[in-house]
Amino acid sequence: MKLAFSTLGVPGLPIPDVLRLATGHGYHGVELRAHPEEPVHPGLTPGDRADVAAQFRAAGVEALALAGYARVAAPGDDETVVAEIRGLLELARDLGAPFVRVFPGGSPDQKTEEADAVAARRLGTAAEYAADLRVRILLETHDSHRTGADVIRVLGPVGHRQVGALWDVMHTWLGGEQPSETYAALSPHLGYVQVKDIASADDTTPLPLGAGVLPLSECVEVLSRGGGWDGWLCWEYEKRWYEAAAPLPGLLGAGREHLGRLLNDSA
């Protein structure tokens, strides 16, 4: 498996510094948070996009994905959401990133069936555009659809190869789903896996990998032995939302070693 980390852990850090962290600690790729407060976002000019892509190529690091914030099940106008996804897809194409992350974002006021149908309709509309650009849209296990069982209710009706799943191990655990259950649901659709660690269900402040309660070893075991999956593990350290969390740069080396041990143990 290849290893990446998310720029959510180093908010606002310039791309050259992000790439130095990746190469210095043995990470193969970077998940780029696509937001106006970050160096990479859909408002970048063509020249800026070409420059970012060139920096990644020169460093020998892959741009794994754009972590966007489109909410595909949210109430409202379809075209606004689809247009947001298209903007992310175009940026991913320009940067050479194979994936775009979207959230479910369903409202508590929606019926489950309605939220599923809205999400499937919008993703189905965006799928052909994604195919044209050779970028894959990944629906994350998150918020209103936090388990694999939730996400597959949307992906099944979409039925398009360019729309898949992003497994966030924290949210499936919080949803009470076992790693084997998540993998069984998502494996035909899985793009990559976000790993992280936390102290408890009541305290989701990010911790160094292996220092918390999330079943990381079970997840890696299921991926490698159970299904022979050979994709990406991406450390999403949510420093942006937890100012008191330790800075990520000082943890990257130990995190890389911990993931390496898990992979060796499951081989």
Image (spheres, rainbow, N blue to C red):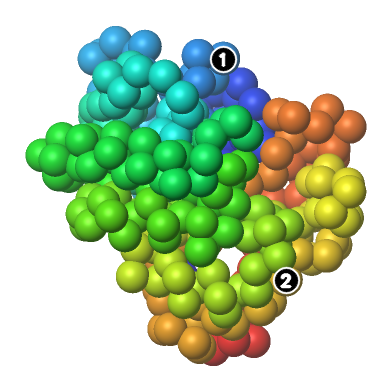
| 163 to the left or right of 177 | left
Residue 185 locus on image (x, y percent) = 45, 70
Residue 95 appears in view: no
Residue with the mark numbered 2: 215
- Element type at mark 2: loop
Mark in the foreground, 2 or 1: 2
Residue drawn at 51 percent across, 62 percent down: 148
Residue with the mark numbered 1: 37
Residue 137 locus on image (x, y percent) = 32, 44
- Return the residue found at the far left: 132
Q: Amino acid at mark 1?
A: Glu
Q: Is residue 196 above or below residue 15?
A: below
Measured in 3D between alpha carbons, the distance from the residue under mark 2 to the one under mark 1, in whole angstroms, is 32 Å
- Element type at mark 1: loop
Q: Nearer the viewer, residue 32 or 145?
A: 145
Residue 251 appears in view: yes
Residue 181 figure quarter: bottom right
| 36 to the left or right of 221 | left
**How packed is label 2: few (under 14 Cα within 10 Å), some, or many (20 or more)?**
some
- Say which quadrant the C terminus sits in: bottom right
Q: Amino acid at mark 2?
A: Pro
Q: Given contact means CB atoms under 8 Å apart, are the residues at marks 2 and 1 in contact? A: no
**How packed is label 1: few (under 14 Cα within 10 Å), some, or many (20 or more)?**
few
Residue drawn at 46 percent across, 55 percent down: 151
Residue drawn at 41 percent across, 34 percent down: 72
Q: Nearer the viewer, residue 33 or 173?
A: 173
Whichever of labels 2 and 1 marks the residue nearer the N terminus, that label is: 1
Residue 90 locus on image (x, y percent) = 24, 27
Q: Nearer the viewer, residue 217 or 15?
A: 217
